[in-house]
Image: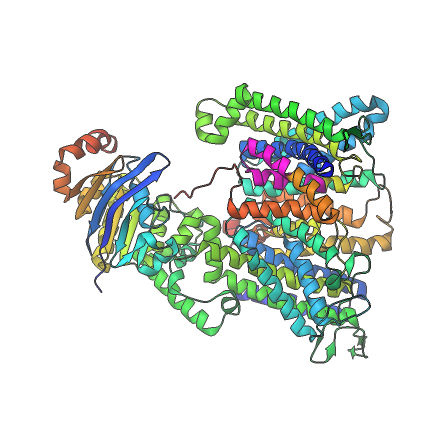
Amino acid sequence: METFVQLVVNGFGKGAVFALLALGFVVIFKATEVVNFAHGSLVLFGGYLVVATRETLGWAGAAVLGVVSAGVLALLVERLLLSRSRLADPFSLALLTIGVDVIITEEIVRRLGVSLPFIGDAWDAQPVQVGGVTLFRTHLVAMVVATVLITAFFIAFRYSNWGVAMRAQAENKEAAALVGIRSSRVTATAWLVAGLLAGVAVLFIATQDFSGAGLSRGTHSIALAAFPAAILGGLDSTAGAIVGGLTVGLVDALSTHYVSFAFAKSAVFLVMLVVLVVRPSGLFGTRESTRV
Amino acid sequence: MWWVRALLWLALLIVLLALPLYLEAQWLRAGEYMMVGAVGAIGLTLLTGQAGQLSLAHAFFLLAGGTAYTVLAGGQEGERNLVGFNLPPLLALLGAVAITALLGIAFAPVAGRLRGIYLGVASLALVFLGLYFGQAAEGLTGGTSTGRAPEPFSLFGFEFSNEGDLEILGVPFRQSERVWYLFLGLLLIAFLLALGAVRSRVGRSWRAVRDNEAAAAVMGVSVARAKAGAFAVSSAYAGLAGVMTVLWFDILKPDESEFGTYGINVSIAFLAMVIIGGLGSVPGALVGAVVVNGLPQVLALYSTKLGWFTGTGEGAFTPVLISSFVYGAAIILVVLFEPGGLAAIGRRIAGRLSNPARGRE
Amino acid sequence: MTPAELRVENVTLRFGGLRALDSVSFDVQPGSLHALIGPNGAGKSSCFNVICGLYRASEGRVFFGDVELTRQRPNRLARLGIGRSFQNAALSSHSTVLDNVMLGRFALTRGGFLECGLRLPWITRTERRHAERAAEICEFLGIGDVLHTPVGALPYGAVKRVDIARALAVEPALLLLDEPAAGMNAAETAELAHTIHEIRAELGISILLVEHDMGLVMGIADRVSVLDFGRLIADGTPAEVQADPEVVRAYLGTDHKENA
């Protein structure tokens, strides 16, 4: 029983991080219908900057810099590349992000070389005992941070001008443009938000508690689990991203323990496949109807 | 002007047939690696370009095809608990292609229900499953640490290996030379089949599904079947490329992480070939494969000669890394400036040559 | 062969709480030119999509001869002898005119990946025969000189004709035309009316036409059904319908001015 409680808490801890990634992914999709395959490279970029600057800036300063830089990089990708190709459809733009992902990821992996630094210094590897249950501090911090950020996001999404504009654009692009919503600003902000969230997520991923592995190509593949999280929740559902993220975290934690570490990654994707067969647009996604 | 084109293709074929007489083994191997890529890329361009279904699962089918061939053609090995069926290599190759096609069909309930981009992400699942399968099914794959050597291909008693002495026009024909002709033959079959299918009702049904599912259905196309069919064909091509991969490496060795011979990076490389060549263009897939699979090979060969990119370890610019940069950038440039890829550029040049007046407009 | 009759029986279509169609019934007599009209959002296209099986009727049935269309998958339609054009043309813009029209021959041909890939002699033979017929149909519709042009490079009027050619390539007994004149100018519309008239005269098939343009409909239709807010409010000859006060109120009163 204690093991199970521990697994569930760990699962939610990991899930909170996946939720942050999936949320960013969904925000971009809602704003532009583009599936951002470069999400993993944003994660790596933010993490790399933390590693590169923490000697001089101190951990907290480096973490802030990393988060902001990931956001700025996402913004730059959108402004410099995607917004330049107005003619391209979302499908081609998704392909374009694959190209971006390859370049950024390969360059950072090259720079990291053989060093695989952990970046969760402030809380990593200091488990706490609650009753008979061992809890990882990283997961606890991640849950708190994710709760705060996700709440903030939903408040902004609901009440801020950007949130309203964004929802209007997701509903109907032409109509949104007609009432004076500037699509380019909404889109750029969506990318910025997604990048910031990815920057936060990496602070928890490249830790001993989360993955037992430092910042590396492996971090990128962990970030890939944000895809099944977003997809099984429904690509265009922000609430779905949270549910999807938590589901992925739980499945990961439980299958690692009860089956094997190697199987855990497949398990996450298998759950996604099952959901997709039953509900092709995910749990909370809008069903597309054919229009002719 | 069709005969000009036919003549050009014929000339290319003759050059390719003659190359083993002139090229050193390592260059032949580089060429063979491009042909492996070309077969896989043709399959992917049919699926993603013609039928509009994004797939990142290509690497999984590569692994499945390679494993199927090795198991079907290989022998039992009691010590390592390896399963083998000792089938003649040709039968094993056909079996591997059939098995991967069936695996593609098994994925049809998912593939048939999802729209292009959803499918792309869903198909990632297969790569992860493949990774697990490669590690877990040691009796088939030989496991990640040692792998398993595939039976060399042979046709009617003729072995595509270093076995026996064979000399043509004074050039000794060893494994590299023989495999060159094997791969060239396989590529030719793959290429012609794809061209024929694209021009027929099958290709038409794929394009219809890509462009408007409702219209396709009303014209008599079963959308789910067309998608499943495209997936099966594309998987079969990837399976054949997988057989060629294990023959080329002379070993079947599953990956330890998502990055490797059958990893996500390979799926992305195939996608890059198809995008660079021009989505849906079969000849374009050939060119894309030459760029993406050829570049690291050629760079590696030149670099040993000239001393470029020979650094190793931390922060080194290896030929593989340089190639990744090049094709990553190529994807971006193609989407931004020439969505039709190299195929569109080729068509424009051809149009200009055959009709100079129009070209100047 | 006399074409079969199309019977729409009490079809209701609900989207959530919205009733797009409310117990709609009408018949399309064999060999007739029947128009389905109504203001925007009246449910004309929904009705078409129910007939084609793209939407599932919540209640009611549609028969074509003895076959219940509401129980068929949409891809059976072509094999039953029904061809359809689309409001937005729904063509492959990168493919040539001939390639698009040849899609209409899909149900009339066979051959899978291997047969087609190997270009077996019987495949090439049938392909050639069907291409000739497709070219003939294009000729008939006045697009015979652009067979090898990509559809994306054609003017709008020609694109709509390619769509009709594709529907005719099915060799239908019943042709469904979804707003063929949408977006056309007066001259193009007049030309199109002539073409539709010719199709019926030459091929003797039934035509069901959804249309917005009253002039076009009243000039060529044998019979007109009028939809308003998902309900059938009138059904009769053009003259009868035009005289119907409810039609005048619902449709002619508001929309006729715009189109005049």
x, y percentage for residue B37? 68, 58
C177 shown above or below C2: above
Identify the residue at horizontal 28%, vertical 58% (top origin): C67
Camera-side residue of C60 and A180 = C60
Count of number-bearing discs: 0
Q: Is residue C70 left or right of residue B342?
A: left
- For the C terminus of chain A, give its image quadrant: top left
B81 shown above or below C94: below
Predominant SS along the magenta part: helix
Name the image quarter holding residue A130.
top right
Query: What's drawn in magenta, residue-wise?
Result: A221-247
Q: Is residue A191 left or right of residue C46?
A: right
Camera-side residue of B331 and A90 = A90
B240 shown above or below A230: below
Camera-side residue of B100 and C196 = B100
Work out whether residue C45 can be spotted. no
Identify the residue at horizontal 59%, vertical 45% (top origin): A272
x, y percentage for residue A36? 62, 38
Name the image quarter holding residue C237.
top left
x, y percentage for residue B61? 65, 58
Way the structure is coloured: rainbow
Q: Is residue A231 magenta?
A: yes
Work out whether residue B309 can be spotted. yes
Identify the residue at horizontal 43%, vertical 53% (top origin): C149
- For the N terminus of chain A, give its image quadrant: top right
x, y percentage for residue A75? 64, 29
Q: Is residue B323 magenta?
A: no
